[in-house]
């Protein structure tokens, strides 16, 4: 599997300085707008809902941005326009499978069947450690990501009947630990990824998958599949 390397500019770093603040982690759960893809869920919603494909890597990244290690802990998205007004309310779609102790240096694949619409990043948590006894969290929540009707962190969209790939999510460590949206680099790598998805979800018309990356000016670079 071939993924792109990050290229981070000064503007991105300035944005991150606004977004991230040290806090204790909170735990959330998804809502009814999205559920993990199963044969039953797909049969019930394939014509009225969309399928979103992504991958997340949850292992600790060592010597990351001045810390001994860092670990992505939570990513959450709200369906727009978000009806939630406080940071305490859970995101509509939450990925929080990071293990507490043993981690593996691989991406975990996810397939979600979701209500059609546009979704924005609304929750991000990264655990950081300077030592075994000095541990904290970078946390960015809804009040920082969704401001004045704008999705500051980035968005993705899915339509009814679509299968959409939005990216591979992991950390980048340039100057400070942060989320970064990677992607499959080149048609051959993307086809290999789709083949692995098809083996797990044979009911999907995987050949029609849209390569439509999570759009962001903060946590990833633009890319067009060739």
Image (cartoon, rainbow, N blue to C red):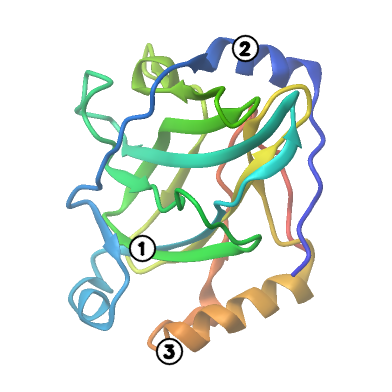
Count residues near mark 1 (Cα–Cα under 10 Å), then give few for <14, some for 14-19, many for 20+.
Answer: many
Q: Of circles 1 and 2, which is in front?
A: 2
Q: Is residue 58 above or below residue 219?
A: below
Count residues near mark 3 (Cα–Cα under 10 Å), then give few for <14, some for 14-19, many for 20+.
Answer: few
**Along the line of sight, which residue is nearer the eye, 151 or 3?**
3
> In the rendered structure, which disc, 1 or 2, sits on the residue that comes first in sequence?
2
**Along the line of sight, which residue is nearer the eye, 38 or 96?**
96
Q: Residue 138 appears at what percent x and percent y?
A: 51, 23
Q: CA distance from mark 1 to mark 2?
A: 31 Å
Label 3, on which residue? 202
Label 1, on which residue? 112
Which label belongs to residue 32?
none
Label 2, on which residue? 17
Determine the image quadrant of residue 77. Answer: top left
> In the rendered structure, which disc, 3 or 1, sits on the residue that comes first in sequence?
1
Check disc 2 and report its element: helix, strand or loop. Answer: helix
Check disc 1 and report its element: helix, strand or loop. Answer: strand
């Amino acid at each position: 599997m071939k993924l792109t390397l990050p290229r981070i500019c000064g503007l991105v770093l300035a944005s991150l300085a606004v977004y991230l603040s040290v806090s204790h982690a909170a735990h959330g759960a998804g809502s009814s707008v999205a559920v993990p893809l199963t044969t039953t869920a797909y049969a019930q919603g394939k014509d009225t809902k969309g399928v979103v494909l992504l991958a997340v890597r949850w292992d600790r990244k060592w010597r990351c941005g001045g810390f001994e290690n860092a670990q992505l802990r939570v990513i959450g998205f709200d369906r727009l326009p978000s009806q939630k007004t406080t940071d305490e309310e859970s995101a509509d779609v939450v990925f929080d499978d990071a293990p507490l102790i043993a981690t593996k240096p691989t991406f975990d694949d996810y397939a979600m069947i979701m209500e059609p619409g546009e979704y924005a990043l609304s929750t991000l948590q990264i655990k950081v450690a300077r030592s075994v006894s000095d541990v904290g969290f970078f946390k960015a929540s809804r009040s920082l990501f969704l401001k004045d009707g704008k999705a500051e962190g980035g968005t993705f969209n899915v339509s009814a009947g679509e299968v959409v790939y939005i990216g591979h999510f992991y950390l980048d460590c340039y100057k400070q630990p942060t989320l970064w949206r990677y992607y499959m680099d080149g048609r051959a790598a993307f086809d290999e990824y789709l083949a692995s998805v098809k083996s797990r979800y044979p009911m999907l018309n995987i050949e029609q998958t849209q390569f439509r990356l999570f759009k962001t000016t903060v946590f990833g670079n633009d890319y067009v599949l060739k």
